[in-house]
Image (tube, helix red, strand yellow):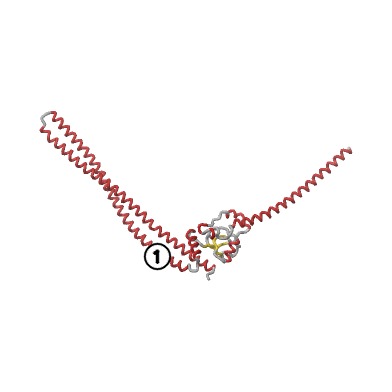
Amino acid sequence: MTTIEDTIEKLKVLQDILSQKFAVQREIDELPKTLATKKELVSRLKKSFVEKNERYETCRRSVADLRVRLQEAEADREKYESQMDQITTAREYDALEKEIRDASDREQQYRKDLQREEKDLQEQKLRLEREETMIKAEEEDLGAERAKIDSDTKERNRLLEELQDQEQKTIPGLGEDLLFKFERIVRSKGGEGIVPIRNGVCNGCQMILPNQFVNDVRMGNEIQFCPYCSKIVFFSDDLDEFEEPGFSDSDEEGLSDLVDDDFDEDLFGEDELVGYEPADRRVMSHMTDDDDDDEDEEEEILDEEDDSLLDEEDEVLEDEEDFDEEEDEEELDD
């Protein structure tokens, strides 16, 4: 039959195994996120490249159209210039001169537009080449990152299998309900699920524990959970060798810190909570009784002081009356 001491020792070993296991699981879950970030970056670069390439193609078509129009304007100007020798009247000369001038203006404008568009086209081409190079580099990094993540994931899965084997070797003799609770505690409490009691204080949450609770832990009849942080607690003789556990009279000033009960009810059902009244209620009731005794003693002292003061006042009054009688007799004699 498994004793409480054996169970505690198994839980200590299991705590280390579960802590490593949960850490490895978190790493396995986090590894693909790095790859997803790289994929998103490459995807954005490719989308930007497509949009810029569309603008480049539009600019390229515009350049081609301007070249055609420039050639047409040059051809028109040359045709009109060749007709100058054939005119016979001033009217024909004026009309032909206007046609030549209009063709020259169009030619000059098309030439300016073409130079501007060709410059813009060249700049866009250079940007596309740079982005294409960047995309290739990012894709290479993505491939290397994917290979690294696959290798790391494989290594962590191997480590996870080893930890699971160690877990299966450790849990025999531990109840399913206890294992379920313990795993939830270790997962939610940063890898710590079982802690010792030192000088009546839980080493998990540093809260002062009730004397009766500490004594029950010391007895070792059953597994006990801290009423404040819900971690499993055990008694260690080497830690509590010189001091008595639990509350003492000198701890009264710190009792106000115990009003808030930090017990994690999410880890257990309402019918599974530890059957101990919170320390502040029990100890405060004890303090209330002590306060009543102190008040009774103070009232007795005040009563005695009041009686003493009354006696002194009576004596003063008697002295004053005697003094007044003596003065009256002296006046009568006079």
- Residue 132 against residue 112 in the figure, above or below: below
Q: Label 1: which residue?
A: 158
Q: Residue at x 10, y 33 (%)?
A: 86
Quadrant into which the C terminus falls: top right
Q: How many marks?
A: 1
The extreme front residue here reads 271
Q: Amino acid at mark 1?
A: Arg
Q: Closest to the observer: 332 or 149?
A: 149
Spot occupied by residue 302 in the image (x, y as percentages of width and height): 72, 50
Q: Residue at x 25, y 42 (%)?
A: 117
Spot occupied by residue 61 in the image (x, y as percentages of width and height): 23, 44
The extreme bottom residue here reads 1
Left or right of 160, for residue 138: left
The extreme right residue here reads 333
Q: Quadrant of residue 168?
A: bottom left
Question: Callout 1: helix, strand or loop?
Answer: helix
Q: Closest to the observer: 333 or 275?
A: 275
Q: Closest to the observer: 70 or 2?
A: 2
Q: Residues within 10 Å of mark 1 (few under 14, many from 20)?
A: few
Spot occupied by residue 249 in the image (x, y as percentages of width and height): 63, 58
Q: Residue at x 31, y 53 (%)?
A: 135
Spot occupied by residue 232 in the image (x, y as percentages of width and height): 53, 62
